[in-house]
Image: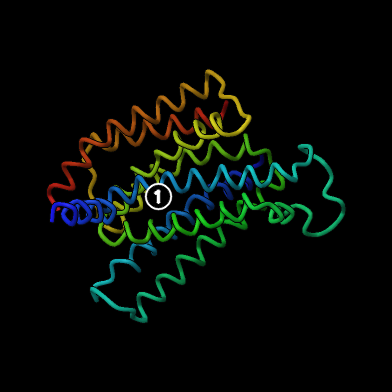
Amino acid sequence: MSDAKTRNGALQLFLNSYSQIALGAVMVTASEILMKAGANTVAVAAGAPHGGSATGWLGIAALSSGYTWLGIGFYILSFLSWIYVLRSVPLGIAYALINVVHVLIPVGSWIFLPETISPMRWCGIGLVIVGLLLLVGPVAKVEARL
Amino acid sequence: MNAIAIILCIVCQLLIVAGQIMLKHAMTSTTAAGISARRLRNFAMAIGCLTLWFFLWLGLMQRWDLSKLYPFEGLNPAMMALGAWLVLREKLPAKAWIGLLVVCFGIALVARS
């Protein structure tokens, strides 16, 4: 009985639009980091010539990496999550909250990829966090009115 | 960057806003459930806008450094809120607008560094 209740509660949480915004942001971050990891496996020097072929500037070579495909999978899942969110949440609110990816992606690339973050960039990330915190209160108020 | 590149960067942002608004329309059509022709048309137009954005952005990246192009992403949250307000008649409280502007500055700062 209580087991079924817990499972039901977990499902409700999963189907909540705001949980899906958070999950979507994490999936976008995972997708970007995985695609970058895939692209890194066939990396060329910045500014290297395109080898003369018409499609040389496309990142098709990265499709040889499993990371890239996993990244594409996460991207598709995040899109499905997004259109689910749009069914019930106003676009302005959903889009404002999804800005959290501007924090998650740089921090994720710092943790999982060999990338560094300059002090100036940390300041920018901090500003995004402050802006999001300013947003959360009014957004909750709008949501309560719906 | 020349004037045309700057205009194209702004067109990119407008395409994202238009695409998202049509996606929102497609997902919340007045006919509550099911697949209607109107819903499908909105969805197709949204995908069209976002595809156009993708290739325009790719083309811009071919010609200019990402560090020059990326700061325009900072316009994105404000333009989306503006679009949602003007087209979808969604209202955001004043404090939320302040938050959005801070986010925009943050993104621009991340992009510049």
Which residue is tagged 1? A24
Give the residue displayed 33% in from the left and 51% down from the top.
A20
**Quadrant assignment, res A85:** bottom left
Q: Percent x, y for residue B83?
A: 36, 52
Q: Chain of mark 1?
A: A
The residue furthest bottom is B37
Residue A110 to residue A92: above or below = above
Give the residue displayed 61% in from the left and 29% down from the top.
A115
Q: How many marks do you count on the picture? A: 1
Q: Percent x, y for residue B10?
A: 52, 48
- Left or right: residue A134 versus residue A26 is left
The residue furthest top is A119
- Left or right: residue B4 versus residue B103 is right
Q: Percent x, y for residue B57?
A: 60, 51
Q: Amino acid at mark 1?
A: Gly
Tell me the element at label 1.
Answer: helix
Screen quadrant of the N terminus of chain A: bottom left
Label 1 Cα crowd, 10 Å radius (few <14 / some 14-19 / many 20+): many
